[in-house]
Image: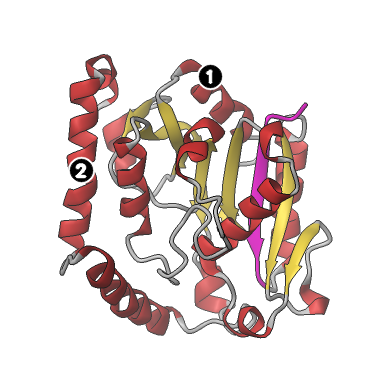
Amino acid sequence: MKKTATIILNRNLPKETDALVEHLIENDGECTDIFVVEAGSDKNNLSKYSTWHINTKDVSKYGLRYLRGMNYGLLELWKGNNWDNYESFFLLTNDTKFPAGQETIKTLQGLLNKDHRLGLVSPCSEKWGEKNLIGENSTRYFWFIHNNAYFLRREFIDQIINTKDTSYMDFLFDGNNFRGYLSESEFIAKTYANNWAAAITTKVFAEEDESYLLDKNSIIKTESYEENLHLYIDEGMMWMKKKYGFNSRWQMMQYAKLFYEKFFEYYPDSKKYKI
């Protein structure tokens, strides 16, 4: 049985999504089942690996974005009685690129098997400053991790999912934070608060292809990069103040770091992974 369910979010970029799916099939096909969420894609722009096509009026117009899209895919697995078949979930945007020949999922599964405190692990990017802190072929715990490639232990997710009157708005992530401003900090704080760790590893790498948003925003029916960044911050700040009473990104990041630091008081043996 395949131990990982991989969920890929697509919106009107079938060729790019198909290429990502086929990379995973070629290099990790024995390790994972793959599910593609179509977030309001046009009928002529569906991936040939499409699993669920959400085409309501609002989703067709605005899409789902990362938080609502991943909630949707995970919730469908949970409702379909497939949840307990998996030990882990790999959440990918379709602009994720892996090195040729890299066995990403097999490696990440091995990390979870080795470190039983790991609830979340992400491949590093060659562009991230964290790469220098981690070192070659190594893994370290962090309090902020970009969310384009989250690999999650199901045992951890079981503790925090909302299973009562739930929807793609609130199954795992807070869908009210539409564009995901500082959602990474919120999620990682929740990870450490529940006695799990969040790590970045340089044993495998993943890159985000920003050209999709820069050059193909009209195809994916979203704002330009500049306008999206402006809305990301403005809408996100309103969400953060309403939910937490925070007035700056530093307050949210310090909130996550407090749980990070507390974790090592409870699990001193994990200090070897601390940055």
Q: Nearer the viewer, residue 163 or 146?
A: 163
Amino acid type of the residue tagged 2 in the rendering? Lys
Q: Residue at x 77, y 38 (%)?
A: 26
The segment highlighted magenta reads 1-11
Q: Position of residue 84 (x, y in %)?
A: 67, 33
Amino acid type of the residue tagged 1 in the rendering? Asn
Q: Is residue 132 magenta?
A: no
Label 2 or label 1, whichever comes before in sequence order: 1
Q: Position of residue 8 (x, y in %)?
A: 65, 55
Q: Are marks 2 and 1 in contact (CB under 8 Å)?
A: no
Secondary structure of the residue carrying tag 2 is helix
The color scheme shown is secondary structure
Q: Residue at x 33, y 81 (%)?
A: 230
Q: Position of residue 17 (x, y in %)?
A: 70, 60
Examine the rendering and report whether any part of residue 103 can be seen: no
Q: Quadrant of the C terminus?
A: top left
Secondary structure of the residue carrying tag 1 is helix
Q: Quadrant of the N terminus?
A: top right
Question: Which residue is identified by label 2?
Answer: 257
Q: Tell me which secondary structure the magenta stretch mostly adopts.
A: strand
Q: Nearer the viewer, residue 16 or 230?
A: 230
Q: Nearer the viewer, residue 148 or 242?
A: 242
Q: Residue at x 17, y 65 (%)?
A: 246
Q: Residues within 10 Å of mark 1 (few under 14, many from 20)?
A: few
Choose top left, top right, bottom left or bottom right for residue 202: top left
Question: Which residue is identified by label 1?
Answer: 113
Q: Is residue 2 magenta?
A: yes
Compared with 96, 104 (above or below) is: above
Choose top left, top right, bottom left or bottom right for residue 107: top right
Compared with 111, 57 (above or below) is: below
Left or right position of 54 against 160:
right
Examine the rendering and report whether any part of residue 191 can be seen: yes
